[in-house]
Image (cartoon, grey):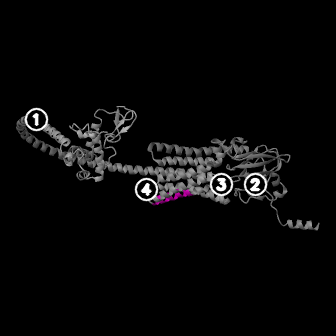
Amino acid sequence: MRALLTLLFILSFFKVPAQQAVELNDRLREHIFSFGQIETLEDPSGRLSFAEVSSPVYSARFRPSAKSTPQTLNLGSTYWFRIRIDQKQVTGNPYLLEFFDQTIDDIEVWVPQKNGTYLFRRLGDEYSFGNRSILHKNFEIRLDNTQTGTQTWYFRIRSAQIADVIIVLRSVDYFIGYALNEYFYFGIFYGMILVFSFYNLIMFIAIRQKQYLYYVLYNLSVGFYEMSTDGIAYQYLWPHWPEWNQVAYAFALYAVGVFALLFTRELLYVKAKAPRLNRFILGVIALRTGFLLYAYFIDRSLLNYKFVEALPLATAFFTGIYIYRQGYQPARFFVLGYSFLFIGFLLKFLIMLGFSSLNFGVISYYSLGFCFVLEMVFLSFAIGDKVRILKKKKDKAQQKMFRQMTINARLKDTLNNELELQVSERTREVFHKSLIIEKKNEELEKANQLLQQQAEEISRMNVLLEQDNFELQHNVAKVTRDRVMSADVDFEEFSRIYPDKDSCYDFLARLKWQHGYACKKCGNDHYYSGHIAHSRRCAKCSYEESVTSYTIFHNTRIPINKAFYMIYLVYSTKGKISSHKLSELLTLRQSTCWTFGTRIKKVMDDRRKQLKKPGRNDWSQLVLD
């Protein structure tokens, strides 16, 4: 007994803080739970059940929230939250509880009942939108307004990204008005994005400047990101795709950064004004793309690091400052617009780090959207300023062109007057000279008539001379060929008749096929020119026969004109010429001359009967096999 009294005495000096219960009555329109009104229990293992959490052992482990808005900072843990609602009497107005953060993946709710039991409900953006009891972008749970007394609500929250546990108690009447106003402002916000995008799309179609296209894509990316984070996209665009809803914001955020950098390059002429900075921008785009692909396919937890987008946006901001310092005026609106955007990002970042004093409720929650609107406005000013400067430059260029055209017109008039004077003087000179030329022409006509008569006479004489020359040349060639075929001539004289291998091959072809062509394989008499000069290819079986095939020259390495001459020498000496003499005359090796000469003599022996009657071109009878 004494020990119990001692324990009670000690406990009287320590005040155990009790959770604050929110009183519910008909005068209450809205209440946001904060600080001691929300108690938190972190479950790192994620295995605690509701029966364990609601037991006295774990009930004492709940701690009041140290922030106005609790957050699930450790993504690997499961968080339990507990609130108390004190309803003194039955209310005439229906009420509901609303979770303001639409990105929470899974919310398990234990709703207290009149008989002391709990009804289990499940909410979250990883479930189909059509399963919600109230089709609204936020998560709502209806209260039983007929139940009196203090009610304890339990929430088990699990999310792949840091979630803001904003729990709001609202009357249904106030919720309807609030939701209508919220959707109205959403319509204004997204309507502005569509108006800006449509206007700049028309400008792109009209002017064909890529900066307008990138600005349209940037605005649409901003709208896509905002719709992904505030739940509008899940409600209206992909209500049955919860898997895509989990990652859509990451792709939208990536598009915001990439198209912001591409728009910056085009608007501020970065490639021309700052080449190194332009290469750095392209590197940031490549790095951001690699990060997205790695995060999506390998480690999706990295998609939660939304502030990685600070790198491309900081790059665009620094680029605007750098180009503005170089004197490019449209960059001032660009820098001003990104200044508001950075304020919004900084506010969100500080709230995420735990600066709860900066959390002003709805204003801070939608601060980034407000900053996006201001940025769009100032970026439009920047585009307009750029167009104004371009128009001003165009006007100056036109004025300069008009002045130059005026000067050119004056110079043209002066030159025309001078040319007219010169032309008139020149005309008089030409007229006097034309009279002289007419007289000269008459004399020339007479001389031309005499020359024409003489030319006709000379033409007749030339015709007769050409006929005589042709006959003389023909006779000389004939005599020379006969001499080659029947008399002793040297190689120089022989080469005049067969100067090169083409003339030899031509003679050989006419000699070989003088009685017509017949294929050695199939006997066909139709042919085409082969791949080798003077060869013939059968039109039926495609067998190609060279001009030296089936002749004494086949497979010989001696130049064809020298081989011709060697046959002539052996034939004319009746085979008595020696290989040494042939080597001397043809400047070939003695062994080569002996080998080919032996082949010729063998053919002569075989055809002795045919050669008994010597005649014209008899040595050519040794050529064909």
Expressed as whole percent of the image width and height from the top left, the position of residue 363 reads: 64, 53
Asked if 551 appears above or below 40 in the picture, the reply is above
The kind of residue on which mark 1 rests is Leu
Of helix, strand and loop, which one carries label 2?
A: loop
Q: Amino acid at mark 2?
A: Gly
Q: CA distance from mark 4 to mark 3?
A: 39 Å
Name the mark on residue 464: 1
Question: Can you say which quadrant of the picture contains the N terminus?
Answer: bottom right
Q: Nearer the viewer, mark 1 or mark 3?
A: 1
The amino acid at mark 4 is Ala
Asked if residue 316 lies in the magenta stretch, the reply is yes
User: Of the residues tagged 4 and 3, which is closer to the observer?
Assistant: 3
In the picture provided, is 580 more to the left or to the right than 289?
left
Within 10 Å of disc 4 (Cα), the crowding (few <14, some 14-19, many 20+) is few
Residue at image location 12% in from the left, 44% down from the top = 425
Instruction: Using the numbered discs, state the Cα–Cα distance from disc 4 to disc 1 in whole angstroms.
Output: 80 Å
Mark 2 or mark 1: whose residue is earlier in sequence: 2
Nearest to N terminus: mark 4 or mark 2: 2
Is residue 37 a member of the stretch shown in magenta?
no
Instruction: Name the one closer to the observer, 531 or 389.
Output: 531
Instruction: Give whichever of discs 4 and 1 has the lower sequence position.
Output: 4
The residue identified by callout 2 is 46
Relative side of 505 to 205, left or right:
left
Residue underneath mark 4: 272
Give the residue pinned by disc 3. 301
Give the foreground label among 2 and 1. 1
Q: Earlier in the sequence, mark 4 or mark 3?
A: 4
In the rendered image, the vertical position of residue 557 relative to residue 14, given as above or below: above
Identify which residue, 179 or 514, lies in the foreground: 514
Q: Which residues are magenta?
A: 311-325
Q: CA distance from mark 3 to mark 2?
A: 18 Å
Residue 309 image point, x, y percent: 58, 55
